[in-house]
Amino acid sequence: MLYQSPISPGFSWYEDTAGPRPEYPALDGDRQADVVIIGGGFTGLSAATHLAKAGTNVVLIEAHRFGDGASGRNGGQLGTGQRAWAEELEGELGFTRAKALFDLAEEAKAHLLDFTAANGIDIDYMPGQMSVAHKPRYVDDYKAHAEIMASRFNYPHVSFMDASETAERLGSTHYYGGTRDTGTGHIHPLKLVIGTGRAAAAAGAHLFENTPSTDITSQGGKVRVTTPRGTITAQKCLIAVNAYGGKLEPVSAAHIMPIGSFIGATVPLGADSKVIPGGESVDDSRFVVRYFRKSRDGRLLFGGREIYGVNDPKDIHIHIRKQITEIYPALKDVEITHGWGGYVGITVPRKPFVREVMPNVISMGGYSGHGVMLSNFFGKLYAEAVAGNRDRLKLIEELKIPPFPGGRRFRTPLLFLALNWFALRDRI
């Protein structure tokens, strides 16, 4: 029987195809370290790898298994730039900061591909991504975006697609136009988690699974992280739990909200399928975005069912099939072999959250659906900061991320109302 994450619903196709998944021991006894990391996803494992390679004594703990959260279960799309379009950031922050944030994200993309190549990690990388408009009134924005990317941000890889080209490249007439980005692609995320864990262990990082943090204190220049069977005392701490922080630390919890996102995988569609013949990944213009792609073996991996409360849908397959059928009516009876979900950490402005939440304790998260590329690089930036160069990390730390309104008691129902309003707008 397939392994099912205890913190994320459903049975994942990634789990079924990632190959051997190493198991790491639980912490048993007290430890001393230079840096302690809480969270065994992309950010934490990347930080552990870079720190250990630099000779830092690093201990990483994960409450469950590496990849049980969003890092091992997400849509696998890299994207380009930050979550918001570069011109949107320019309007808010000015060109200089927007360009710096865009360039940082482009470096993150290159870093991910270089890191996996250097460490022998096969992540099933497939090139290309399309962003498509689900309403006619958005088409001009996509056309302008392609022009702006080339002329203002020195990124010539985005081209505009009219309705005819979009239909041909998607194998569907459901959308009205969009852009095609040949400078990015998509991956098998759990293979990245597994490979990064191996790289971290090989570099000398001390990795522990099934080891939750029950308390964090910072006093007298020391950080102490308590677990059920031991305490880790370190000079610095990185909190890298994103959507799965719960009550671990109040500042992060106030700024990062978990939302559920769900994916279904079909049987292989066959070599003659007209669905995404070029193999690109796809995201659309809905606020409650739909994202889909074909795997290396020709399956359609389709995500788009989001929930904003605490309950999981009773049958992931039903919801995903309905959305697949809207775009690809011929697939209304296609077999869906896997359905799974995970929780994404979002912030109010959909920008990442990086903050020193107590002395010598930095929290990272809130990637808002754009974390496959950014989170790995943020682990590297954290290692740079530990080594004494915090300049690039400061670009993110200085972003203004307000807390969610309503406090811990009311923020979930308020967000539920707000985001369901946007979901309604998607349909009209």
Image: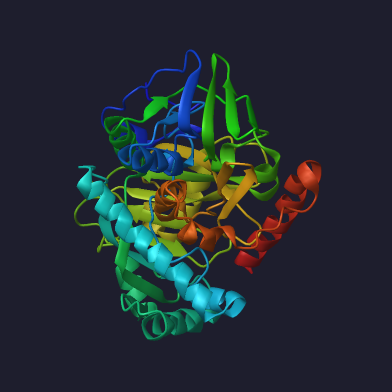
Query: Hey, which quadrant is residue 252 in on the image?
Result: top right
Quarter of the image with the N terminus in it: top left
Quadrant containing the C terminus is: bottom right
Depicted 12 relative to depicted 269: above or below: above
The residue sitting at 30% across, 47% down in the picture is 299
Residue 219 vertical position relative to residue 46 in the rendered view, above or below: above
Camera-nearest residue between 323 and 120: 120
**Residue 32 in view in this figure:** yes
Give the residue at the far front of this rendering.
220
* Residue 230 pos. (x, y %): 54, 16
Instruction: Report x, y in % for residue 49.
Output: 35, 39
Q: Position of residue 179 (x, y in %)?
A: 39, 74
Q: Quadrant of residue 266?
A: top left
Decide if residue 332 is in sight here: no
Which is more toward the observer, 287 or 117? 117
**Residue pictured at 46% horizontal, 61% vertical:** 392
Q: Residue at x 80, y 41 (%)?
A: 409
Residue 56's x, y, as percent? 38, 36
Q: Is residue 311 above or below residue 411?
A: above
Left or right, 268 with reference to 413: left
Horizontally, residue 217 falls left or right of residue 151, namely right
- Along the horizontal axis of the image, is 253 left or right of 223? right
